[in-house]
Image (cartoon, rainbow, N blue to C red):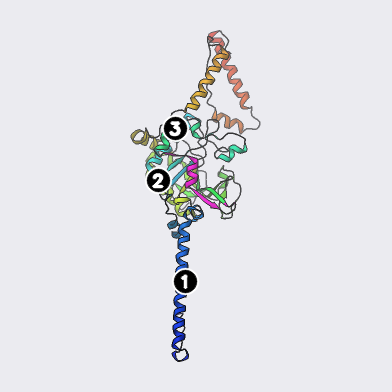
Amino acid sequence: MNGRVRVKKSSISSSTLTQLSILFSIVTLSIITWDLIRVKFKLDSCSTQLDNYAFHSPELNTIQQHSECTKQDQHFVLLFDLWERLANFRTALQQIMAIGLDSEFKVVEPFVYETKVQYGMHLPYLFRTKNASIQGLSTYFSTETAIENGSLIEYKNWRNSASIHDPSVQSTVGYISALVVFDWKNELPRNSQTADPFWWCDGTHAFSNVIEDGTTSNGLISIGQDVVYERIVCVDGVFVENDKNIGREFFDELFELVKAGTRFRGKCGAITLAFENYRKNGFGKYATHLIKTKYQSQVEMPLSKQYLKLARTVIARKKHELNSNAASIVVHFRMGKTMALLEGQSDSITLSEWANGCLHDLKNRTDSIFQTTVK
């Protein structure tokens, strides 16, 4: 029958057939008009909910092509922990920025607490939970040049580009496509059938230090009041330390893996990776080569005016306290690893006791050499 209804001519008059024909035309026209209205509605919705909440499908990807998107399928990298403090974390950040310029992804300006990019203070709401003022990278370093040349993007601008609509809270949230955990010691489980340097490891939540706040109604995992992530990907740390293994292809393939394995896209098709435990020894030689040969001026970040002013104030105060004519010694403790080791031992001496012991020993040695008292 092919879905058609057969009618005998003799049973229906010509006038009735004419009326039916007119009625059929009206219905057909109405259907076409309604389809046009629906398409128009969808196109008009680009700047609202459909921008922000999109499954990975051809239909919605087409809808996202709107005037706010200067570039489609943008790639971003967030940094949650860099281990080192100040000078060394700047080195690690500059390395990632140089790679981003070469591989066409943008590094999101990280948050800094006590001169360190670190777990527990990697998102704005975590500062609020500790009643601490939110400190971005610009607190310590001048970031204007890096932002202007595109190697760095402010957090608020990333939120605008990578947001989706969360029906759980009826608002937009920052969407991270995947957390990236570096396996520096070859201890994370992996699929034995693949030799790829990265693999999905969603079941290894124990290896992720990001505190989770539950699952949203669309199956994403909340890691704060306004940020969610979808999956976890592990990266072979030994592999990335070998500069012969690293090039633009590595990052292209990593983003492609995440693109193919996730359901959502941020506004403008954005894909975001959040590096959990990145260290400057990863990609180091490759990134250093890029900086020296191509991107030196574009990743420079001198100390900020705010930081220099603070340093001068502290120096002036200490000089006044010690008397500017008195001899003095400045001691710089590099003790990040020691701090971590001592804090991990409940029956060990405290960091304060350890530091005081070192200072006491230093004072005694100084007295014996210079036969003077160091305050």
Q: Position of residue 358 (x, y in %)?
A: 58, 20
Tell me the crowding category of disc 2: few under 14, some 14 to 19, or many 20 or more residues within 10 angstroms, Cα based. Answer: some
Q: Position of residue 256 (x, y in %)?
A: 42, 51
Residue pictured at 47% horizontal, 64% vertical = 37
Q: Which is more foreground, mark 1 or mark 2?
A: 1
Query: In the image, is residue 29 above or below residue 203?
Result: below
Q: Nearer the viewer, residue 44 or 175?
A: 44
Residue assigned mark 3: 91
Q: Which is more foreground, mark 3 or mark 1?
A: 1
Q: In the current view of this chain or complex, which residue is farthest to the left? A: 293
Disc 1 is placed on an element classified as helix
Query: In the image, is residue 342 above or below residue 245?
Result: above
Query: In the image, is residue 64 above or below residue 31?
Result: above
Q: Position of residue 333 (x, y in %)?
A: 54, 24
Q: Which image quadrant: the N terminus?
A: bottom left
Q: In the current view of this chain or complex, which residue is farthest to the front? A: 15
